[in-house]
Amino acid sequence: MFSDRPAEYTQRVDSRRTALIKMAAAATSAAFAPLLAETPEAEHHMHEMLEQAPAPVAIGPEYFNQSDYATVSKLADLIIPRTDTPGAIDAGVPHWIDKQVAADMKLQERFKQALTELSEQAHAAGGTEFTALAEPQQIAILEAMSSDLSKLKGGFFETMKNLTIDNYYKSEAGLAQELGFKGRTFRASFPGCTHPEHWPAHDPNQEHA
Amino acid sequence: MTVQKAEPVWDVVVIGSGAAGGMAAWNLTRQGISVLVLDAGERFDRAKFWTHVKPWQAAARRESGQHAPEFYLSTEEQPYLTPEDKPFELIRVWGRGGKTNVWGRVALRYSDIDFAGPARDGWGVPWPIRYQDISPYYDKVDQFIGVCGGLDDQDSLPGSKYMLPAPAPRCGERLLQKAAQNVGVSIVAGRRAVLTKPHNGHPACHYCGACGSGCDVGAFFNASDYLIDPAMKTGKLTVVDNAVVARVLVDDKGLASGVQYFDRKTKAERRVKARVVVVGASCVDSTRILLNSKSSAYPNGIGNSSDAIGRYLCEQIRFHVYGFMPELIGGPVYDDSGIGGEHIYMPRFNHRDGRKRDYLRGFGMQFWGCGAQEGASYAKALPGFGVDFKKAVKQRYPALVALHPYGETLGRAENRITVDAENVDVYGVPRLKIEYQIGDNEHRMAEEMYDTAEQILRSAKAEIMPYERGWLDKPGSAIHEHGTCRMGDDAKKSPLNAFNQMHDVKNVFVVDGSAFTTASEKNPTLTILALSWRATDYLADQMKRGEV
């Protein structure tokens, strides 16, 4: 969004990585195979097919061990919890973060160190693991991380929050259900702003499509 | 390595198939001239674009091993060199239609203020043409490709009678227009090469907003569908795919005799013969080709007696400021896709204020990314986490506005492209080296650019997102390279004359952004199309007279 570069530009690198990931997805890829539809009906049909495509087979995390994956999941959940709309876990955020960390050595280092520190803090707070703490204690630890401005910029909390944001707000749960994104579809017309109170007193161009 | 000499002698070989090369090929073939286009890639298949694939569907597709069409040339395949302290982001599309497959579609005419700039302030060399010379070609281009826009011309933004209807502005854009008007700044309808109604056999835009993935129906100008396809129908055009041009070849009279290229798949060397060579491979690649075209007649590159080729590289400065409009926070969410990118534009105004400025030239402003977007990166700038954070993100989703000022940069001899004989590419051809730095004039202009953006957002009482005043985007990121083979009447200072013809080599024409004498603050594609059309009209006429 902070660039007019199409998404494919930044995603290109990711696509190479994910291409290497072995997925039990032979069944799903057939459902994704129908390519671009050029009529609204076909688009609708394609959308339905995608909707009906089986969810990725749960084969467990690729990079994290179960305990670390549980911690990462809890962190994502604390950052974007489920409310009357889906939260980060509903949106599959931990799954995508696992894939991204698996493909990035720098992220691996960062998570390794941060998860160790979190574990130590959990012990200091009287728990066995971060995930075993009561939620108020977990929130207190996150608040300490996010309020220390000297550590915030470039720190682990920022990394974790940004990864959660990126993955949640591009998911169907985050983008369509939570935010209400309705784009990449076919429309016969574009109404634009229909609120005269938003308009300038003088419109330099009186003619609109 | 085998050398194969092709039999035919083409009337014209055109290097590149984008806005510049595509226009040359179309305009020459329709006048009965036989043309060979050398394209560094292949046609991008519209049926395989991911235009209507939602972000979450794209993620699932990628996970299952599929990938979207790769428009952008990988720097792994074609690395280029930059000094460590002078980064330059070079973005290239090799393939039929080039960057027009995914371009920003902003279609602005240069004004006479732009063409008169260097003659007026004395920086650089004067343009050899003025607005009146090119305006008939702007008219033709507008009618041919279809440009939507408003009836709201200004001295810095001339228009035409041929605009397609402008799309209605979104709420945030309306509020920006209103806020700007309250501080005396005019924001007009955007001018974009997007079809708001069917035009010349091309269908109208269907407002999916996914132009950056390539248009699945060709509802915005791209050189492949709009120029190369009709040129093909004349029977006068041949296109060679995957032809990576290395050099323009010369005969013993110092005239161009053809082109040497390498097959991108097999790496085999090929040569073709031609009476005329038209170079339109985009600014940076055209410059690479010209500088690598060394011979005893032209020891520092073909047509380069001025030593200007490669110098005076200009790329616009720009930055991005974001805010949230109070009227829209927490309000309803609409589908703000529209024609993709902004529906409004702020024309240059700094020449009117009567104040003495401490910099030369000017700036305009673009506004892509207003309203509901395909993501919420702004969330990273919002504090905290949890339920309140999630709510803060949602409330701001419909309210986002984005301001992107673009400023002209001055041409400087030391901002240059060279080729490095010590560093060769996969074909054994010297690689590109780009040395580029933003200068003091631009930093001074950026102050007023920031002032203007702040003034508009404050007038709107917007919640302004944190930004670092003075920050400028990485050089190259505007993807508007110009000036490295500039036009001018003085052959000692400019490689090209007023018709994009080399002063030194009369059968070589250079028709892309490299030919621009100055950069302006405006997006260059419409002017590239007009210049290429004008240059090839001249060329066709000269060929008929037997002058070339």
Image (tube, rainbow, N blue to C red):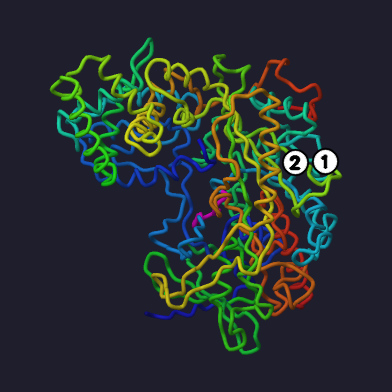
The answer to whether residue B92 of the structure is visible from this angle is no
Across and down, in percent, residue A140 comes to 30, 19
The answer to whether residue B70 of the structure is visible from this angle is yes
Q: Quadrant of residue B255?
A: bottom right
Give the residues drawn in magenta, as a range.
B90-100
Instruction: In this rendered view, identify the residue nearer to me: A206 or B48.
Output: A206
Q: Mark 2 or mark 1, which has the lower sequence index?
A: 1
| Image disc number at residue B347 | 2
Q: Is residue B209 above or below residue B48?
A: above
Task: Give, as a three-letter code, the residue at label 1.
Answer: Gln
Q: Which residue is mark 1?
A: B154
Outermost residue toward the left?
A: A128
Name which residue lies at 85% across and 55% down.
B132
Report how far apart the C-alphas of labels 2 and 1 lie in the structure: 8 Å
The kind of secondary structure the magenta stretch mainly shows is loop
Task: Give, as a three-letter code, the residue at label 2.
Answer: Pro
Query: SS at mark 1?
Result: loop
Chain letter for mark 2: B
